[in-house]
Amino acid sequence: MLDYTMPRADNFPMIESDRIETPSPSNTLGVKGVGEMGSITSPPAVVNAVVDALSDYGVKHIDMPLTSEKIWNILQTNGG
């Protein structure tokens, strides 16, 4: 591993970017939202972390959305 160096810009292939524009028929501007992309995987990851944290109490599954009341009820039911 000592002989391995981090790749530099001249080690990477040239990349040509391209795009295809497909207007949305559902609004007058023809625009589509992209801000939701990062939130698709975040909630399930948080739920999995909570389920893992509560696994000592026998919790194997929790439906979204997570609320403090839901967690409290699960802990009370499972002896937490």
Image (spheres, rainbow, N blue to C red):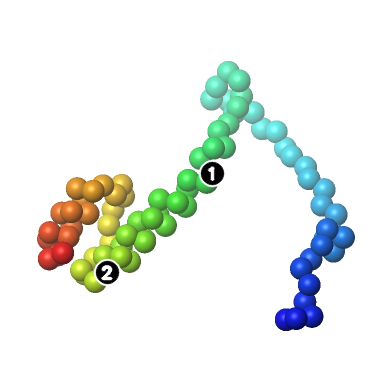
Q: Which mark is residue 18?
A: none
The relative height of residue 67 versus residue 22 in the rendered view (above or below) is: below
User: Crowdedness of circle 1 by 10 Å Cα count: few (<14), some, many (20+)?
Assistant: few
Q: Tally the numbered discs.
A: 2
The N terminus sits in image quarter: bottom right
Left or right: 36 with respect to 11?
A: left
The residue at the far top in this view is 28
Q: Quadrant of residue 25?
A: top right
Tell me what residue is drawn at x 36 percent, y 61 percent: 49
**Is 78 in front, or is 30?**
78
Give percent across and percent down for residue 78.
Answer: 14, 65
Q: Secondary structure at mark 2?
A: helix
Q: Secondary structure at mark 1?
A: helix
User: Crowdedness of circle 2 by 10 Å Cα count: few (<14), some, many (20+)?
Assistant: few
Q: CA distance from mark 1 to mark 2?
A: 29 Å
Q: Earlier in the sequence, mark 1 or mark 2?
A: 1
The residue at the far front in this view is 2
Q: Which mark is residue 55?
A: 2
Tell me what residue is drawn at x 75 percent, y 81 percent: 2
Q: Which residue is mark 1?
A: 37
Give percent across and percent down for residue 53.
Answer: 30, 65
Q: Quadrant of residue 56?
A: bottom left
The relative height of residue 72 versus residue 19 in the rendered view (above or below) is: below
Q: Quadrant of residue 61?
A: bottom left
Tell me what residue is drawn at x 54 percent, y 44 percent: 37
Tell me if I can see residue 15 in this picture.
Answer: yes
Looking at numbered disc 1 in the image, what kind of residue is underneath it? Met
